[in-house]
Image (tube, grey):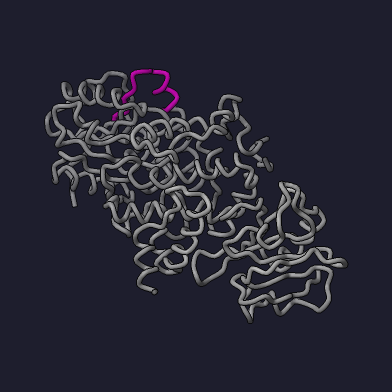
Amino acid sequence: MSTGIRTIGVAGCGTMGAGIAIVAARAGFDTVMYDLATENLERASTQIGGFFEQSVRRGKLTEEAADSAQKAMVPTSDLADLAACDIVIEAVFEDLSVKQELFHALDLVCPSRTIFATNTSTLSVTEIASGCERPDRVVGLHFCLPAQLMKLIEVTPGVLTAEDVLVAAWDLCLELGQDPVRTSDTPGFVLNYIVVPLNNDAIRLVEAGVAEPAEIDTALKQGMGYSMGPCELLDLIGLDTQIRLCEAFHAVTNDPRHAAPPLLRRMVAAGHLGRKTGRGFYTYERDAMFGG
Amino acid sequence: MNYSIVVHGQSRSFPEGDPFRAAAVPDAAVQVHLGTARDEVPDSEGVDCSLIELDLECLGVRTGEAAGAEGDRRIGFARWQVGEREPSGLVELVVQPASNPAALEAARTVFTEAGFSVAVCRDFSGRILDRLLRPYFNDALRGLDEGLASAADLDKTVRLGLGYPEGPIALLQRLGLVRHHEVCRSLFEAYGAPAYAPARRAVVAAERRQ
């Protein structure tokens, strides 16, 4: 199992991109981190430094391994610096035209052998691939948040993805120390296909007055052994993020369960976005959780 | 807190031999009505709380309703289980708009002292867990049929991506597609929503059982 991949590009250095870059560098790959906005690169570098520091402190990584991983990461805001990459994984805004434009621009920069991977969680890999000149070398690699901690990667071929590209992407996941699963190019792949409507259903139970958020979370944790209930999970991922997921998902499926519930929209309008604003289905003070 | 048991038929929540039954005493102020026979249970004088075991029916079926003013010392309950085996440690308590708060507190105490976790919900078909989990199971079964991923990859995605202890396909295979079908039919009848319509694999399992 050798993919021949030595240099990985990560395009888009938000939370997800930074996490993917950590995974790549930690596994010993030269990692080029691209973002148009230098402030994003600076923020990502700070977060990455903090992550590695903590990993060393907790004994998860040696100091040498952390140093070596950080030295393998090259931040840049010049797209041309991705030219040497064997694969570029995009983690830019979840918008079809944004992703298509990026791959179109990368076509002009990268050699024909370079694989383009999309970290989309809701859009079609085939549609994203249709925006570039190498649709056969485009594949879906959906990392889960937080990418630096979660092992799962959904590996999704588009209609035109070449078999050798799919195999290389799969093997790369293994080389990265990740756990790949193969899914078909359908909306939400597996994870969001399952979790977006499940979370919406939980919101609708609250909205209909069936039960309080804490009761719903208790039921799922105690009844099914889940580590977190849906209301806690929604507060963690952000209620605004759930709306964005719903909008991307519902636009493709037209399934009413994928539409953002009115309560979700009201909470976001009120600034109750979850943990990040200190209030969502629960109230948070100094990281302590209180009943909603 | 002491409780007595009144048996109305076979109990799904606490079948014969369950330690919860063994711990009951005669003539306690809390009465636990076990069994899925749909008898009406009266709000008896001298009883602080009547706990009524529910299967798929609403509590109102066992108590009667009064245009939104229903509720007294009768509280519904059901011990959650996915299928036909392995009841969980979670008891859903069902209240009506005017349920007596002291009766609800007594219900909580009885079950928590017996080692169960409790979640309270209003009197809707499917309560909390069937309302949330049956559509999720159906999604997984439909995803499998439609080639979204293999059964193993569906389950692995859910375990690794969401941290669930077991994937939906393995769970249903192990604990009961037939019961899933039965619950879904009841929910579909109650709500008419496609998410509750039993998935094809559940229909097949139910037909084979017949």
Residue visible at 43% across and 42% down in the picture: A63
The answer to whether one can see residue A64 in this image is: no
Task: Give how far across and how far down residue B148 sits, in percent.
Answer: 29, 50
Seen as rendered, the residue at the extreme bottom is B17
Residues shaded magenta: A32-44
Residue at 73% x, 70% y is B32
Decide if residue B132 is on the left or right side of residue B169: right
Residue depicted at x 28% and y 34%: A89
Residue drawn at 26 percent across, 52 percent down: B147
Q: Quadrant of residue A74?
A: top left
Q: Position of residue B208 (x, y in %)?
A: 35, 72
Query: Where is residue A155 shown, x and y percent of the image?
Result: 27, 45
Q: Is residue A119 above or below residue B138?
A: above
Q: Position of residue B210 (x, y in %)?
A: 39, 74
Q: In this orientation, which residue lies closer to the viewer: A200 or B150? A: A200
Q: Nearer the viewer, residue A86 or B95?
A: B95
Can you name the residue that lies furthest to the left here? A112
Considering depth in this image, is A60 or A77 the residue closer to the camera?
A77
Q: Would residue B198 be visible to someone looking at this image?
A: yes
Which image quarter is the C terminus of chain A in? top right
Q: Is residue A41 magenta?
A: yes
The answer to whether residue B162 is magenta is: no
